[in-house]
Image: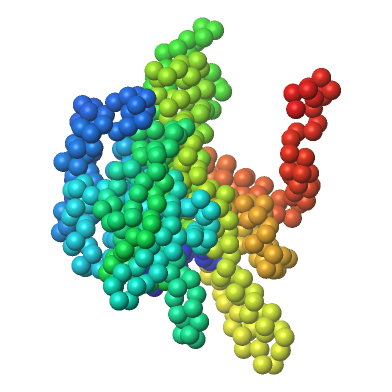
Amino acid sequence: MPSKALPSFSKALFSGILLDELLFPYPKMDKEEAENLKLVQETFKKFADDKIDSQKIDEEAHIPDEVMNGLKELGFMGLSVPEKYGGFGLSNTGYVKMLEFIGGTDPSVAIMLGGHQSIGYKALILYGTDEQKKKYLPKLASGEMVASYCLTEPGAGSDAAGIQSKAVRDEKRGVYILNGNKQWITNAGIADFLTVFAKEPITDKDGKVKEKISAFIVTRDMKGVSVGKEENKLGLKGSSTASLFFEDVEVPFENVIGEPGKGFKVAMNVLNAGRLGLSGGSLGALKHVMRPALAHIKERRQFGKTLSEFEMIKEKVAQMTIDLFATESMIYLTSGLMDRGDVDYSLEAAMCKVRATEVAWNGINECLQMVGGLGFMKEYPYQRLMRDGRVNMIFEGTNEILRMFITLAGIRDEGEYLKKIGEALKGPIKGFGVLTDYATQWLKDRVMTEHIRDVHPSLANAKVQFETWAKNTHFSAERFIMHHGKNVIYREMRQERLANAAIDLFGMISTISRVDSLIAEKGEEKCKHEIMIANVFADQAWRRVRRNLLMMDSNADRQMGELSDFMVKQGFYPFATESMEILL
């Protein structure tokens, strides 16, 4: 993400500002790149049809050497590496589309490739020096080196600031002495290039020494690096997941990525970028499993008609389609923001990850349900894809943590505004200018930004509902801050509701933008299904937003908290009927 990025659309939304110029028209891939991407996808499909046996990979918990070697030889390890370093040089949009395509073939392969390039060497691309890039990117692009992102520790998962790995400078030898261990690291067993995050003592301007996170390039051949046993996982069995241990590893000063002490920013921006790849891969898996499910309900007959004729089955198919289209719209609008290179996309990336992983999980579950008993059998892909997809709601920031991030980052600027009001009111004369400036801005925002640009008449109602509930979400966020002050950080149930509202609103505006641009390109008649999807999704979404906002003030949060505390204290379910107590 650029150091001086334009404001995030979603952050501005929390403050009542609709920056529709960031989202209209809907971004479109460069024609030449789109054609090249199609060729790359065709190459991968031909290779996958010949070499990738997903059931075998799952059963043997290993990606065969011939598959790994083939991926390397065909250049799939360097999808996002610039061409001058030997990669394909795909844009962010092209890369996510490619990972979606691979995710629809085999999630274990997709995770291996994503762990390698979405996050494994992403810090090098974003923050590396020219010398570092020249030294490592050609080997990473060719697959001579496989990359891994090493952040999570036994005591620090989503709380990245809590990592305990330490790096101490040895000025005489020009190296850091690195000690610590990392847990649940994707590609750990096969990686040669490790992006490792550790704390080092940093002296600030006041002469005080504080421990801050730095990012380091560590290679497997460095003395003191070792890997633990492979984890036995629920899904994604073909990908390597293990612990890494660092004992007095000597890391040269020139292997720091970015500035010393600025590693937390590096880590977070890598994850911001990586979340879109994970989002694309999740949707790819759902699209893949829909094919046999749709074929099944079209052919399978019960009570004299096909399953596809039953209304409850129709509802499942339609809802999956609507959710896929809206989430896809969010993902590729966000990748377009990334490709601009001047926009803060951190909230949007988090929203995409939350929505995509949950849509995929729910959709795969519905596909399994539609095919009935077949879905439970190992020779069919449904159960495997369910197992593979479950971890996506945990990877790269749990969806609970990301919902907290969405709300707290979203309301931060609004909180600063309200803080200025409070300071101004303490000294009415001295602070009059501040208060006047804020009041002027407050009015300006509401007069100038409560509407987005005109869209095609077929989307007019969706547009009105978006504008109405965007404004109401802003007011709810403002009340939330004013009522709870600094304690907003502890009101997680309310944070979740605001985050869900914001995710739905971003889904609405993404879908409206996409369909509006499609109508402009193809004409209304050729977009009747897309228009239908946009309007149904908007109708569903604003109703969910309304419910979430109503529950900001009227809810059972206190009772839910008390009940949870009681259950944790008990340690078991204490309400069983008398005949069941013996089981406890």
Residue 350 appearing in the image: yes
Query: Would you say residue 451 is visible in this rendering?
Result: no
Q: In this view, does 266 lie above or below 427?
A: above
Q: In this view, does 424 lie to the left or right of 197?
A: right
Percent of width and height locating residue 228: 39, 43
Q: Residue 415 in the image: x percent, y percent? A: 62, 71
Q: Quadrant of residue 475?
A: bottom right
Q: Is 395 in front, or is 145?
A: 145
Q: Is residue 106 left or right of residue 286?
A: left
Q: Residue at x 59, y 70 (%)?
A: 414
- Which residue sits at x=79%, y=33%? 574
Q: How is the protein colored in the picture?
A: rainbow
Q: Residue, x 50% and y 82% (percent of image)?
A: 208
In the rendered image, residue 544, in percent from the top left (x then y), is placed at 62, 45
* Quadrant of the rendering where the C terminus is positioned: top right
Quarter occupied by the N terminus: bottom left
Pick whichever, 183 or 391, lies toward us.
183
Residue at the (49%, 86%) spot, across then down: 206
Closer to the camera in the image, 405 or 115? 115
Q: Where is residue 140 in the image (x, y as percent from the top left)?
A: 22, 52
Q: Can you name the residue that lies furthest to the right here?
A: 578
Q: How many badges with numbers are in the image? A: 0
Q: Nearer the viewer, residue 164 or 120?
A: 164
Give the side of residue 66 with respect to residue 224, left or right.
left
Q: Which residue lies furthest to the top in this view?
A: 304
Q: Residue lying farthest bottom?
A: 429
